[in-house]
Amino acid sequence: MLTVNGDKMSKSLGNFITVHQLLEKIPGELVRFVLVSSHYRQPLDWTDQIVLQSRQSLDRLYNALRGRILNEDAQVSESIKTALEDDLNTPLAISALHEIATQLYKTSIESEKNQLASILKVSGAWLGLLQQNPETWFKGTGDIDEKEILSLIALRNQARAKKDFAAADVVRNSLLKRGILLEDGPEGTTWRHQFVEDL
Protein backbone atom coordinates (compact mmCIF):
# COMPACT_ATOMS: atom_id res chain seq x y z
CA MET A 1 0.00 0.00 0.00
CA LEU A 2 1.26 3.44 -0.93
CA THR A 3 0.00 6.59 0.74
CA VAL A 4 1.02 10.22 0.23
CA ASN A 5 1.45 12.35 3.34
CA GLY A 6 -0.72 9.92 5.27
CA ASP A 7 -3.59 9.83 2.76
CA LYS A 8 -4.44 7.16 0.20
CA MET A 9 -3.27 8.24 -3.22
CA SER A 10 -6.19 9.30 -5.38
CA LYS A 11 -6.96 11.74 -8.15
CA SER A 12 -9.92 13.13 -6.22
CA LEU A 13 -7.60 14.24 -3.40
CA GLY A 14 -5.16 15.73 -5.87
CA ASN A 15 -2.26 13.72 -4.44
CA PHE A 16 -1.82 11.34 -7.35
CA ILE A 17 1.85 11.09 -8.37
CA THR A 18 3.14 9.16 -11.36
CA VAL A 19 6.68 7.84 -11.69
CA HIS A 20 7.09 10.08 -14.76
CA GLN A 21 6.27 13.15 -12.65
CA LEU A 22 8.74 12.07 -9.96
CA LEU A 23 11.52 11.56 -12.49
CA GLU A 24 11.13 15.16 -13.64
CA LYS A 25 12.12 16.30 -10.15
CA ILE A 26 14.28 13.64 -8.54
CA PRO A 27 16.71 10.96 -9.81
CA GLY A 28 15.35 7.51 -10.58
CA GLU A 29 17.79 5.96 -8.13
CA LEU A 30 16.30 8.07 -5.36
CA VAL A 31 12.80 6.84 -6.24
CA ARG A 32 14.12 3.26 -6.05
CA PHE A 33 15.81 3.92 -2.70
CA VAL A 34 12.59 5.30 -1.18
CA LEU A 35 10.63 2.28 -2.40
CA VAL A 36 13.08 -0.31 -1.05
CA SER A 37 13.49 1.54 2.25
CA SER A 38 10.23 -0.06 3.36
CA HIS A 39 9.56 -3.82 3.42
CA TYR A 40 7.30 -4.90 0.57
CA ARG A 41 4.79 -6.30 3.06
CA GLN A 42 4.52 -2.96 4.87
CA PRO A 43 2.73 0.21 3.74
CA LEU A 44 4.85 3.09 2.49
CA ASP A 45 3.91 6.71 3.15
CA TRP A 46 5.49 8.90 0.46
CA THR A 47 6.38 12.28 1.98
CA ASP A 48 8.84 15.07 1.23
CA GLN A 49 10.59 14.14 4.47
CA ILE A 50 11.22 10.52 3.50
CA VAL A 51 12.53 11.67 0.11
CA LEU A 52 14.91 14.11 1.82
CA GLN A 53 16.08 11.47 4.31
CA SER A 54 16.61 9.00 1.48
CA ARG A 55 18.65 11.56 -0.45
CA GLN A 56 20.82 12.15 2.60
CA SER A 57 21.30 8.40 3.02
CA LEU A 58 22.29 7.95 -0.62
CA ASP A 59 24.63 10.95 -0.39
CA ARG A 60 26.36 9.33 2.58
CA LEU A 61 26.80 6.04 0.73
CA TYR A 62 28.01 7.69 -2.47
CA ASN A 63 30.39 9.87 -0.47
CA ALA A 64 31.99 6.68 0.90
CA LEU A 65 32.82 5.71 -2.71
CA ARG A 66 34.36 9.07 -3.61
CA GLY A 67 38.00 8.87 -4.60
CA ARG A 68 38.24 5.12 -3.97
CA ILE A 69 40.04 2.57 -6.13
CA LEU A 70 37.37 -0.05 -6.69
CA ASN A 71 37.79 -3.76 -7.30
CA GLU A 72 34.90 -4.90 -9.51
CA ASP A 73 35.59 -8.53 -8.48
CA ALA A 74 34.85 -7.84 -4.81
CA GLN A 75 32.44 -10.20 -3.07
CA VAL A 76 28.96 -9.18 -2.01
CA SER A 77 28.61 -8.67 1.73
CA GLU A 78 27.17 -11.72 3.48
CA SER A 79 24.95 -9.42 5.56
CA ILE A 80 23.31 -8.16 2.34
CA LYS A 81 22.74 -11.72 1.13
CA THR A 82 21.29 -12.74 4.49
CA ALA A 83 18.94 -9.75 4.56
CA LEU A 84 17.60 -10.34 1.06
CA GLU A 85 17.23 -14.08 1.63
CA ASP A 86 15.11 -13.25 4.69
CA ASP A 87 11.84 -12.56 2.84
CA LEU A 88 13.51 -9.85 0.74
CA ASN A 89 14.22 -7.65 3.78
CA THR A 90 15.38 -4.58 1.88
CA PRO A 91 15.36 -2.22 4.91
CA LEU A 92 17.81 -4.56 6.65
CA ALA A 93 19.93 -4.71 3.50
CA ILE A 94 20.09 -0.90 3.39
CA SER A 95 21.10 -0.93 7.05
CA ALA A 96 23.90 -3.35 6.13
CA LEU A 97 25.10 -0.94 3.41
CA HIS A 98 25.31 1.83 5.99
CA GLU A 99 27.28 -0.45 8.33
CA ILE A 100 29.86 -1.04 5.58
CA ALA A 101 30.08 2.73 5.00
CA THR A 102 30.52 3.30 8.74
CA GLN A 103 33.42 0.84 8.82
CA LEU A 104 34.97 2.64 5.86
CA TYR A 105 34.67 6.05 7.54
CA LYS A 106 36.23 4.69 10.74
CA THR A 107 39.36 3.14 9.24
CA SER A 108 42.39 5.24 8.38
CA ILE A 109 44.06 2.55 6.26
CA GLU A 110 43.68 3.37 2.56
CA SER A 111 43.74 -0.26 1.39
CA GLU A 112 40.91 -1.10 3.80
CA LYS A 113 38.92 1.92 2.61
CA ASN A 114 39.27 0.74 -0.99
CA GLN A 115 38.31 -2.82 -0.06
CA LEU A 116 35.22 -1.71 1.89
CA ALA A 117 34.22 0.71 -0.90
CA SER A 118 34.46 -2.14 -3.40
CA ILE A 119 32.24 -4.35 -1.22
CA LEU A 120 29.81 -1.44 -0.78
CA LYS A 121 29.48 -0.86 -4.54
CA VAL A 122 29.06 -4.56 -5.41
CA SER A 123 26.58 -5.03 -2.57
CA GLY A 124 24.62 -1.94 -3.59
CA ALA A 125 24.16 -3.46 -7.04
CA TRP A 126 22.00 -6.17 -5.48
CA LEU A 127 19.50 -3.41 -4.69
CA GLY A 128 20.05 -1.52 -7.94
CA LEU A 129 21.93 1.19 -6.06
CA LEU A 130 25.34 2.91 -6.08
CA GLN A 131 26.18 2.13 -9.71
CA GLN A 132 26.80 5.71 -10.83
CA ASN A 133 30.10 7.52 -10.62
CA PRO A 134 29.93 9.40 -7.28
CA GLU A 135 30.79 12.71 -8.96
CA THR A 136 27.96 12.21 -11.45
CA TRP A 137 25.59 11.53 -8.56
CA PHE A 138 26.57 14.66 -6.65
CA LYS A 139 26.61 16.95 -9.65
CA GLY A 140 23.27 15.69 -10.87
CA THR A 141 21.88 16.28 -14.32
CA GLY A 142 20.21 19.10 -16.11
CA ASP A 143 21.28 22.41 -17.62
CA ILE A 144 24.13 23.07 -15.22
CA ASP A 145 27.07 24.77 -16.93
CA GLU A 146 30.10 23.15 -15.30
CA LYS A 147 32.57 25.53 -16.96
CA GLU A 148 30.73 28.51 -15.50
CA ILE A 149 30.68 26.93 -12.05
CA LEU A 150 34.42 26.19 -12.17
CA SER A 151 35.04 29.76 -13.30
CA LEU A 152 33.06 31.09 -10.32
CA ILE A 153 34.92 28.77 -7.96
CA ALA A 154 38.23 30.16 -9.30
CA LEU A 155 36.90 33.70 -8.77
CA ARG A 156 35.93 32.80 -5.21
CA ASN A 157 39.35 31.28 -4.56
CA GLN A 158 41.01 34.50 -5.76
CA ALA A 159 38.83 36.51 -3.38
CA ARG A 160 39.71 34.19 -0.50
CA ALA A 161 43.42 34.46 -1.32
CA LYS A 162 43.08 38.25 -1.03
CA LYS A 163 41.15 37.75 2.24
CA ASP A 164 38.11 39.36 0.65
CA PHE A 165 35.73 36.96 2.36
CA ALA A 166 32.68 39.12 1.67
CA ALA A 167 33.21 38.75 -2.09
CA ALA A 168 33.88 35.02 -1.67
CA ASP A 169 30.59 34.66 0.21
CA VAL A 170 28.73 36.47 -2.58
CA VAL A 171 29.94 33.85 -5.07
CA ARG A 172 29.09 30.96 -2.73
CA ASN A 173 25.62 32.33 -2.02
CA SER A 174 24.87 33.03 -5.68
CA LEU A 175 25.69 29.39 -6.53
CA LEU A 176 23.68 28.16 -3.55
CA LYS A 177 20.62 30.00 -4.86
CA ARG A 178 21.01 27.98 -8.06
CA GLY A 179 21.17 24.73 -6.09
CA ILE A 180 24.96 24.37 -6.22
CA LEU A 181 26.69 23.59 -2.93
CA LEU A 182 30.42 24.25 -2.58
CA GLU A 183 32.50 22.00 -0.32
CA ASP A 184 35.99 23.08 0.77
CA GLY A 185 38.49 20.35 1.61
CA PRO A 186 42.22 19.69 1.82
CA GLU A 187 42.37 19.06 -1.93
CA GLY A 188 40.48 22.21 -2.85
CA THR A 189 36.87 23.16 -3.54
CA THR A 190 34.40 20.73 -5.06
CA TRP A 191 30.78 21.28 -5.95
CA ARG A 192 27.64 19.23 -6.03
CA HIS A 193 24.00 19.67 -6.87
CA GLN A 194 22.03 20.38 -3.72
CA PHE A 195 18.76 18.52 -3.34
CA VAL A 196 15.83 20.94 -3.37
CA GLU A 197 12.73 20.06 -1.32
CA ASP A 198 10.34 21.04 -4.06
CA LEU A 199 8.35 17.92 -4.91
Image (cartoon, rainbow, N blue to C red):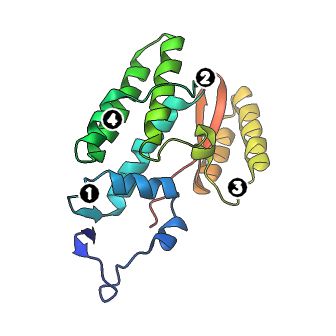
For marks 4 and 1, the one nearer the N-term is: 1
Q: Which residue is mark 1?
A: 40
Q: Which mark is residue 81?
A: 4
Label 3 sits on a secondary structure element that is: loop
- The answer to whether 145 appears left or right of 169 in the picture is right
Q: CA distance from mark 3 to mark 1?
A: 36 Å
In the image, is residue 50 above or below residue 199?
Answer: above
Q: Which mark is residue 144?
A: 3
Quadrant assignment, res 41: bottom left
Of the two numbered discs 3 and 2 in the rendering, the one whose residue sits closer to the viewer: 2
Could you say where residue 92 lies in the image, as x and y percent from the top left? Answer: 26, 40
Badge 2 vs badge 1, beta-carbon distance below 8 Å: no
Residue at the limit of the structure toward the top, as seen here: 109
**Does residue 60 show up?**
no
Q: Give the class, few, some or many, for how many residues have Cα within 10 Å of label 4's Cα (few <14, many ≥20).
A: some
> What residue lies at 20% left-to-right and 59% top-to-bottom?
42
For marks 2 and 1, the one nearer the N-term is: 1
Q: Amino acid at mark 1?
A: Tyr
Q: CA distance from mark 4 to mark 1?
A: 17 Å
Q: Amino acid at mark 2?
A: Ile
Of the two numbered discs 2 and 4 in the rendering, the one whose residue sits closer to the viewer: 4
Of the two numbered discs 4 and 1 in the rendering, the one whose residue sits closer to the viewer: 4
Who is closer to the viewer here, 82 or 170? 82
Q: Which residue is mark 2?
A: 69
Badge 3 vs badge 4, beta-carbon distance below 8 Å: no
